[in-house]
Amino acid sequence: MAVGEWPVWSTSLRDRTATAVADPVLRSNIGAATDRFGTKRTSALAAVHDPDGLRRAARGVRGQILSNWAETLETLADNVMANGGHVCWAPTGADANDYIAAVARRIGASTVVKSKSMATEESGLNEALADVGCEPVETDLGEWIIQLAGEHPSHIIAPAVHKNRHQVADTFEAEAQMTDRVTEPAALVAFARAALRDRFLAADLGITGANFGVAETGSIVLVTNEGNARMATSQPRIHIAVMGAERVTQTWEQADLLLGLLAKSGTGQPLSSYTTVISGPRAEGEADGPDEFHLVILDNGRSTLAGTEFAEMLNCIRCGACLNVCPVYRQTGGHAYGWVYSGPMGAVLTPLLAGSDHDHGHDHGDGSSNPDELSGASTLCGACMEACPVEIPLQDLLLGLRRRKAADASRAEKAMWSAWAAAWSRPAGFRATASMAARTRRLGPLVSRLPGVSNWTDGRSMPALPARTFSQRWRSGDV
Amino acid sequence: MTAVHLFVTCVGEMVVPDVPVAAVRVLRAAGCSVDVPVGQTCCGQPAWNAGFTEQAAEVARTSLDALDAPLADDPDAVVVVPAGSCTTMIRLYWPQLFELVGDDERAARAREVAARTFELTEFLEGRELPTVDGAATTVALHESCHLLRELHVETGPGAALARVAGCTRVDWSADDRCCGFGGTFSVKLPETSVAMADEKLDTLPDGVEVIVGADSSCLLHLRTRAEHRGLAVTTRHVAEVLDDAIRAEDGSEKGDGRG
């Protein structure tokens, strides 16, 4: 089944969010799931001696790694090759896809099993594999569900979080030949397990992401709760891991700290159910493992962030905690954000990665948008900064992106803010606005129909304005 | 007697003047002298949050100049703001704002003012204020985002409310979740903004008559959404609740409007 076009900058953020919030089932599914994650995260962190100290340490570790980023990546690549693996440096998603497609063609692969990878969502790998005649099969349960449904992930760690079990059963009936409908979670999992087992056995090529790449031993670390990464990395002849270039650590000590925080912050587990470490292909005398191991290091705009005011976004460990606490994400789910990443981290990262190809203005006059518009998908409530395990100042980064967007705003919008500033930088102008506001009290019904004003009044009443301003009362001495 | 200089805020000036009026009376009851520095307008937050730095600085400059003159004359004087959001702008963002526009002299003065600026309930926590008898009301507290998560004032509004005997506060599962206002967010993504307000209102425990908070803009958003839906619940700023009770005890007259 064809997957909807990504990204979707042909529509405006407002249209996408309005469509999402008009779906009460979606809102209820997202609300229930994020509440569950949030509660588990809170109790997992409550069991830690000094959670704030841990977050500070994690931020420090990320900063330390990224201050030696290029060198650390070189060490990782050298050690992967020393372990008998291959390394591909992919400047763009298309480069990563080309490399992987070439490997698939060389071995005549027909079935490819994939373990969950946001980096390959970023590059659109599944479409690229289909183009060379391979059938990619997602093996993470949530990813498989949305692959069957022809959708994209709506959450970075729980891709099908927007669907309830009845909707999952609908998808299995329509797209996976489920003839005896079941809706209990355990039964749905059993159905998926049976269906996927054959695909694992048939696969020539296994593709995974990489939660971390550990430079000192040339290893990659994968976490799952289903064990599917172990199947995808041990059964097929070839394993290719695609790693976002920032997901590197220098040492195991650093990886250990971040792994614990990732699980606690994401799913509220002490550690994920399966933590898999891959250090190269099957070695002499080993029973399991692939003949070849390839590590694709995906840049795709990441290196352009180093040294900029947005560099801290490179610290993100993709735990999803900011999505789970975001009151905007809670109402809209992930698809409204228009691309792979959603919630606060998506509102920051998407303009930085996908935005490099776009002008930063926001109004194309034809209902379309560009990624910078995502910086508006926040009330700046600060819940994301509070939840972030590596203390990324998401709110400050959103403000920085809004400044970038404002610099390219339309002449009309700039003129509006300049007129506002000219009036409110003078007490007399400020008072004039106040008395004008007071005078519009009697014009309420007319005013509420003005364009722009209706954006407020369609869902809310007009506040009744007072007869006298505070200053008038203060000066008259009756306060 | 501590000299308090009130920063009124634009919403307080134009939309809900009963709130700064109540704040003045409560501060006096807490043993402070209150003045309203001439020349203040707005903190500049609307433009700052929209990314229009120059315009934000132009407005913030006027208010900074109005506030720091009286502070310079009296080393014990403070600025008090009846809104967590505007306090955040002054305390956390003014120094950065003036640095960004290259006004280092004002950035330095902004840091001085920031260190002596307090949100109303935060300031009251450190003051003697007697417990007063208020009308029997069942209320829920909306914990506003900037006050809670940027200024880290976690107990101020609740402590102020606890001084009003007769006022029963019930727990609200969504008390610390954003109301959906977010300034221009409310008109740029209105459907989402309204959905956020609805979730707050729909989770309100049975029997709650009034939502109390320390930020008028959040309260306005919740109240106008509730009105639009025909819900009976209304809102009041914590300063008004305190002031009502103080004046009821004094036997003086009620105010002339709504808050």
Image (cartoon, helix red, strand yellow):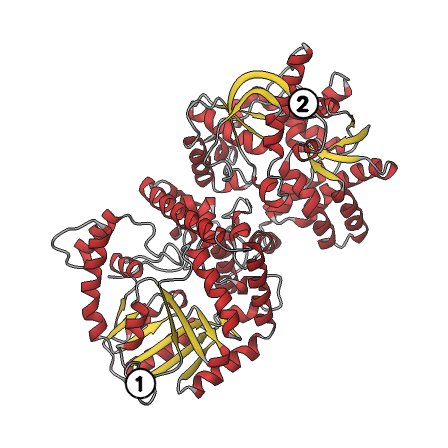
Q: Give the amino acid at mark 1.
A: Glu
- Looking at the rendered structure, the secondary structure element under dot 2 is helix
The chain under label 1 reads A
Q: At which x and y percent is residue A283?
A: 34, 87
Relative to B60, A465 lies left or right: left
Q: At which x and y percent is residue B145?
A: 56, 41
Q: At which x and y percent is residue A74?
A: 52, 81
Q: Is residue A172 above or below residue A62?
A: above
Residue at x 37%, y 79% (from the top left corner) = A99
From the image, which quarter does the N terminus of chain B lie in? top right
Relative to A133, B44 lies left or right: right
Q: At which x and y percent is residue A324?
A: 44, 50
Residue at x 67%, y 9% (from the top left corner) = B251
Look at mark 1 in the image and give the residue it sits on: A286
Residue A191 position by quadrant: bottom left
Are the residues under marks 2 and 1 on the same chain?
A: no
Residue B18 position by quadrant: top right
